């Protein structure tokens, strides 16, 4: 038979492609053969009374029997090629490696080896046969897939005996299939952020992207083509130098990978925990962590390696380094800068100062467990250590204005004069309230509140409440409001000299200081 000699596997490929209706020229291009060789074999096929489908069903010995004149190449070249594929598969997961690079490496050892098209074809066949496609097509360190499992675990309140469901966060690196599992109280944004932060610490590095399958805790506004990621997740991504990719639901093969991981988590983590009782989410996670280590050390069924070995050898070196500190959950609020140059943070029920030139402006407040920051038009204008003391004013001196510039006729005398219309104890109490602050402007808000109580209660009751509160250590609006609310002002109290209630304080100034 004229033409280039081919081996038995190439013959099978030739028959397969012709069975699909490809022309001789297309077959030659696909298999890297000369057209004359393909023409010769097609002519030989035509002399047989068998269809291409029947030829494909023949054994190797039967094919050799049909074409005895064919001088087949030794199968050793084909078998030798396949010995390279497991190592080449690992190399492909590394950044920058391509099939062209691997083929050139192969030719260095085997100059008479397969042409590039055949090389790729044989590799893809091996890949499909070993069911490695779900792994090989993912680049090491590129993506982290995450989802919440459909089924929950549980923990028990030790005091009440109430059983609480625990959601379960599952993340997987698709290249090595290294898996992370963590129980959370819910699937809210803060739960997801905590789980992701712990996951990255567990991995010891950061992937280029985090894929969340349009999770509710990730997407602020859904859209078929351009969903909007919420600010917290954007902030987390900026902190770790990665991207959040919720642009589409998982590709079917990706989804199969994640769902497969969750199915194995049910078997190897859920089931062993099914007869145990836990009294907190932390205790439950301790048990999960022990089983998770074992899970990642299980050998694959079709490969002589484990998830951990794959991770340490291939995936971990490809991860980006962690930042110096873990991410802290950041909350976002809108606020208006009050006349006293402070914003009110309702979460903590306290106040933080802002430079006085922003009075009346709407600002964005961002706060974590440790700090409170205020932004105007994207620029940070204030930074404070977070306080959890309700009613406290956290103030930076340079933020406060010259009183006469902003408050005009607002000064201690102005409030004292209006309080005097209620009574002498009210006047004394408001002077004391304003004087106890390093910046009297801070007291103006509460003083204004006490004066406003006369709209709800008779002036006589407000005066009586101020008289009763005069014995207290610290003056404040809430003290007067609570006395009135609980009718404590109507209890008889001994008369106290007014002079005893006005402290000797440097901030008590006359009206002339504000002219």
Image (cartoon, rainbow, N blue to C red):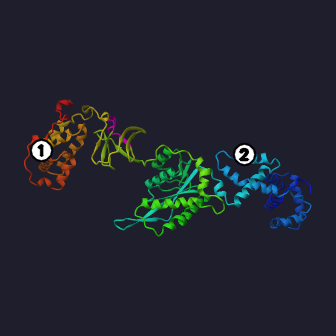
Where residue 511 sits: x, y (%)?
Answer: 17, 32
Of 297 and 66, nearer the camera is 297
Where residue 407 sits: x, y (%)?
Answer: 25, 35
Res. 185 visible in picture: no
> Is residue 359 part of the magenta span, yes or no?
yes
Of 414 and 255, nearer the camera is 255
Res. 228 visible in picture: yes
Query: Looking at the rendered structure, which numbered label has been put on residue 101?
Result: 2
Quadrant location of the N terminus in the rendered image: bottom right
Where residue 258 sits: x, y (%)?
Answer: 57, 59
Residue 281 falls left or right of residue 176? left
Magenta-drawn segment: 354-364
Quadrant location of the C terminus in the rendered image: top left
Which quadrant of the figure has residue 74? bottom right
Q: Which residue is mark 1?
A: 425
Of 436 and 75, nearer the camera is 75
Residue 293 falls left or right of residue 123? left
- Say few, some or many: other residues with alpha carbon within 10 Å of mark 2 (under 14 / 14 to 19 / 20 or more): few
Where residue 204 sits: x, y (%)?
Answer: 53, 49
> Is residue 506 part of the magenta span, yes or no?
no
**Vertical placement of residue 418 versus 76, above or below:** above
């Amino acid at each position: 038979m004229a033409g280039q000699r081919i081996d038995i596997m190439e013959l099978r490929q030739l028959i397969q492609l012709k069975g699909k209706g490809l022309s001789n020229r297309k077959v030659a291009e696909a298999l890297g053969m000369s057209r004359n060789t393909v023409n010769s074999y097609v002519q030989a096929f035509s002399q047989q009374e068998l269809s291409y489908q029947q030829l494909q069903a023949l054994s190797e010995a039967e094919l050799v029997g049909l074409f005895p004149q064919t001088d087949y190449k030794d199968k050793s070249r084909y078998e030798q090629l396949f010995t390279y594929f497991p190592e080449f598969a690992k190399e492909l997961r590394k950044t920058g490696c391509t099939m062209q690079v691997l083929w050139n490496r192969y030719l260095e050892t085997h100059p008479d080896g397969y042409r590039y098209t055949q090389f790729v074809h044989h590799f893809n066949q091996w890949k499909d046969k070993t069911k490695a496609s779900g792994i090989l097509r993912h680049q090491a360190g590129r993506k982290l897939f995450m989802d919440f499992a459909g089924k929950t675990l549980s923990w028990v309140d030790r005091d009440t005996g109430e059983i609480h469901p625990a959601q379960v966060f599952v993340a997987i690196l698709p290249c090595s299939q290294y898996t992370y599992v963590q129980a959370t109280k819910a699937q809210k944004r803060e739960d997801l952020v905590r789980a992701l932060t712990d996951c990255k610490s567990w991995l010891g590095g950061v992937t280029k992207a985090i894929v969340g399958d349009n999770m509710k805790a990730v997407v602020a506004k859904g859209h078929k083509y351009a969903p909007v990621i919420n600010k917290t997740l954007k902030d987390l991504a900026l902190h770790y130098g990665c991207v959040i990719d919720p642009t589409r639901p998982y590709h079917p093969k990706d989804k199969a990978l994640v769902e497969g991981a969750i199915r194995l988590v049910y078997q190897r983590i859920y089931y062993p925990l099914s007869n145990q009782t836990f009294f907190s989410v932390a205790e439950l996670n301790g048990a999960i962590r022990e089983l998770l280590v074992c899970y990642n050390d299980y050998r694959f069924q079709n490969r002589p390696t484990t998830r951990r070995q794959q991770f340490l050898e291939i995936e971990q070196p490809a991860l980006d380094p962690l930042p110096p500190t873990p991410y802290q959950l950041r909350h976002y609020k809108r606020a208006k800068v009050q006349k006293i140059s402070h914003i009110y943070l309702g979460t903590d029920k306290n106040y933080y100062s802002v430079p006085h030139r922003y009075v009346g402006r709407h600002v964005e407040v961002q706060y974590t467990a440790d700090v409170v920051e205020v932004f105007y038009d994207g620029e940070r204008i204030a930074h404070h250590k977070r306080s959890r003391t309700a009613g406290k004013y956290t103030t930076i001196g340079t933020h406060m204005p010259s009183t006469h510039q902003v408050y005009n006729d607002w000064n201690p005398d102005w409030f004292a004069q209006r309080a005097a219309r209620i009574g002498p104890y009210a006047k004394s109490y408001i002077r004391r309230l304003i004087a106890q602050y390093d910046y009297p402007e801070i007291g103006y808000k509460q003083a204004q509140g006490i004066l406003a109580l006369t709209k709800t209660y008779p002036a006589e009751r407000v005066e009586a409440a101020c008289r009763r509160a005069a014995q207290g250590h610290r003056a404040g609006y809430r003290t007067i409001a609570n006395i009135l609310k609980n009718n404590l002002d109507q209890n008889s109290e001994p008369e106290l000299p007014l002079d005893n209630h006005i402290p000797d304080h440097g901030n008590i100034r006359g009206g002339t200081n504000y002219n």
